[in-house]
């Protein structure tokens, strides 16, 4: 049965249960997962970002989640380096990275960016037309897009018959004044592939950019560097590609946890497309322009008293360690939540993060956490040998001997690789070694350990509760 656009919109923004019902007949990603498809708390659709979704959703097959996340990322990247939040000694700007994970073509991952880009073209035409790029493949290429002026010492030529003058510092490239850059990578799998090539330095440059550090490569033929770069990345990838290509090394070195991972799929079928061109976008564009102008005047963004109380309650869960690849790609939960809450606040023209902004950020982070759980499972290390052993152990409640484990690989894997894999499983708390008595020598048996991974649950307090809390930082 076809769903009326208005009804679907109401479901997408206010009732996730209704969204799931509307999607029931839609094809799902044909990849088995021990975790259910993630659901979103409607609190995430707060404020201007939610209103952008509210306006666009009836006219696109894109997932409302993709619209919401990109609305926040686009807004944050269109700002400058002024607004920021601080955690201990770390300065967090309004940039974020996100990768949408879904079925090839059917998930409508790229459609959402096009719809939002049209609105931002009216609100900030310079950014929307000049500061969005694609084709990221090297660290040098990324640095070059936001480079500082380049100077070079050159000897002054003397007149005929005279000695050359003293060397002078000459500008050979004016650099880039506007350091904002949004990279849209619809083939994120290609980026993961090139990262594995010897000498490719795109991974450390991306990590430096998210951290707000000076971007510079130690390559003799690439003298460029970039200070104050304001870089965000949005990628698209399928679930099988992500599981295959995001290696344990990339997860462990911090590349994976500098991205938000979100499962997306087509929200509905629109055989004749939407009719966004018939919608009066002027009020929304005006609100967006006002919010951008306001946010560019803001410096440090702190939490108010209510938000600080909620932050103290959820901080333990946010900072909890999770095992395997799941833990590796979600290790920066606190930082991502801080950045998201700051974006919600700035879009609300607020100089402080309020409780409602933090609740919206927590709802969106919870979806990202559940998406990562859906992709990587609760006990995947990213090492093919270790993961295969763990799968076999989970299928053998009585455990497996070392000989049985070796036979899993038909003796095509070295004993050393198996020993390393077992050590990793034991260190991660996913497997244990038992020595069981026999009539002869004790036998070594490996058994899977069931790990309960907590789900982030933030307290159900009323916004504005605890009126007597202090509001000073």
Image: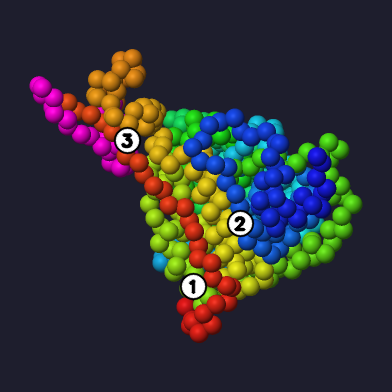
Q: Which residue is mark 3?
A: 448
Check disc 3 and report its element: helix, strand or loop.
Answer: strand
Mark 1 or mark 2, earlier in chain = 2
Q: Is residue 214 left or right of residue 95?
A: left
- Counting residues from the N terminus, which is met first, the one under dot 1 or under dot 3? 1
Q: 10 Å neighbourhood of mark 3: few (<14), some, or many (≥20)?
A: many
Q: Earlier in the sequence, mark 3 or mark 2?
A: 2
290 to the left or right of 4: left
Q: Residue at x 38, y 52 (%)?
A: 321
Q: Secondary structure at mark 1?
A: helix
Q: Given this view, does label 1 or label 2 mark the residue nearer the observer?
A: 2
Which labelled disc corresponds to residue 308? 1
Q: Nearer the viewer, mark 1 or mark 3?
A: 3
The answer to which of 315 and 346 lies nearer the viewer is 315
> Which disc is residue 200 wearing?
none
Between 156 and 472, the one lying in front of the other is: 472
- Magenta region, residue range: 418-442
User: Please, which residue is most extreme toward the left here?
Assistant: 440
Q: Position of residue 136 (x, y in %)?
A: 59, 39
- Along the horizontal axis of the image, is 288 left or right of 352? right
Q: Position of residue 86 (x, y in %)?
A: 48, 67
Image coords of residue 203 (percent x, y): 48, 41
Residue at which label 2 appears: 41
Could you give the CA–CA distance between mark 3 and mark 2, rounded to whole angstroms? 33 Å
């Amino acid at each position: 049965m076809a769903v009326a656009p208005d009804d679907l919109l109401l479901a997408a923004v206010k009732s996730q249960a209704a969204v799931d019902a509307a999607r029931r007949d839609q094809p799902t990603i044909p990849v088995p997962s021990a975790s259910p498809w993630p659901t979103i708390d409607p609190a995430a659709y707060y404020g201007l970002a939610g209103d952008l979704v509210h306006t666009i959703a009836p006219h696109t097959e894109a997932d409302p989640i993709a619209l919401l996340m990109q609305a926040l990322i686009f807004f944050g990247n269109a700002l400058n380096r002024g607004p920021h939040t601080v955690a201990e000694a770390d300065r967090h700007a309004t940039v974020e990275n996100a990768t949408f994970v879904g079925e090839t073509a059917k998930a409508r991952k790229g459609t959402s960016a096009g719809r939002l880009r049209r609105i931002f073209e009216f609100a900030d035409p310079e950014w929307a037309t000049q500061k969005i790029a694609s084709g990221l493949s090297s660290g040098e290429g990324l640095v070059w897009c936001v480079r500082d002026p380049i100077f070079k010492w050159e000897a002054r030529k003397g007149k005929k018959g005279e000695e050359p003058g003293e060397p002078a510092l000459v500008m050979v490239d004016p650099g880039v004044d506007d350091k904002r850059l949004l990279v849209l990578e619809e083939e994120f799998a290609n980026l993961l592939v090139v990262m594995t090539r010897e000498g490719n330095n795109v991974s450390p440059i991306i990590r430096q950019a998210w951290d707000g550090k000076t971007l510079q490569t130690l390559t003799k033929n690439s003298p460029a560097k970039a200070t104050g770069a304001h870089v965000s990345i949005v990628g698209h990838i399928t679930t099988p590609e992500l599981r295959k290509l995001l290696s344990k090394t990339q997860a462990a070195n911090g590349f994976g946890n500098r991205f938000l991972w979100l499962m997306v799929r087509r929200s509905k079928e629109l055989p004749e497309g939407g009719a966004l061109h018939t919608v009066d976008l002027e009020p929304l564009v005006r609100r967006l322009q006002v919010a951008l102008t306001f946010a560019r005047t803001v410096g440090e963004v702190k939490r108010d008293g209510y938000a600080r109380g909620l932050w103290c309650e959820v901080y333990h869960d946010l900072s909890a360690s999770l095992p395997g690849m799941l833990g590796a790609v979600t290790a920066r939960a606190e930082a991502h939540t801080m950045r998201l809450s700051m974006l919600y606040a700035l879009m609300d023209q607020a100089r402080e993060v309020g409780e409602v902004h933090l609740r919206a950020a927590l709802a969106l982070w919870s979806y990202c956490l559940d998406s990562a759980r859906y992709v990587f499972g609760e006990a995947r290390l990213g090492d093919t040998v270790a993961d295969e052993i763990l799968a076999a152990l989970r299928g053998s409640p009585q455990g497996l001997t070392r000989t049985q484990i070796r036979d899993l690989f038909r003796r095509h894997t070295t004993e050393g690789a198996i020993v390393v894999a077992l050590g990793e499983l034991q260190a991660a708390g996913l497997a244990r070694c038992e020595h069981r008595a026999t009539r002869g020598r004790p036998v070594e048996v490996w058994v899977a350990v069931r790990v309960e991974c907590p789900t982030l649950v933030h307290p159900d307090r009323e916004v504005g509760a605890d009126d007597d809390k202090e509001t000073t930082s």
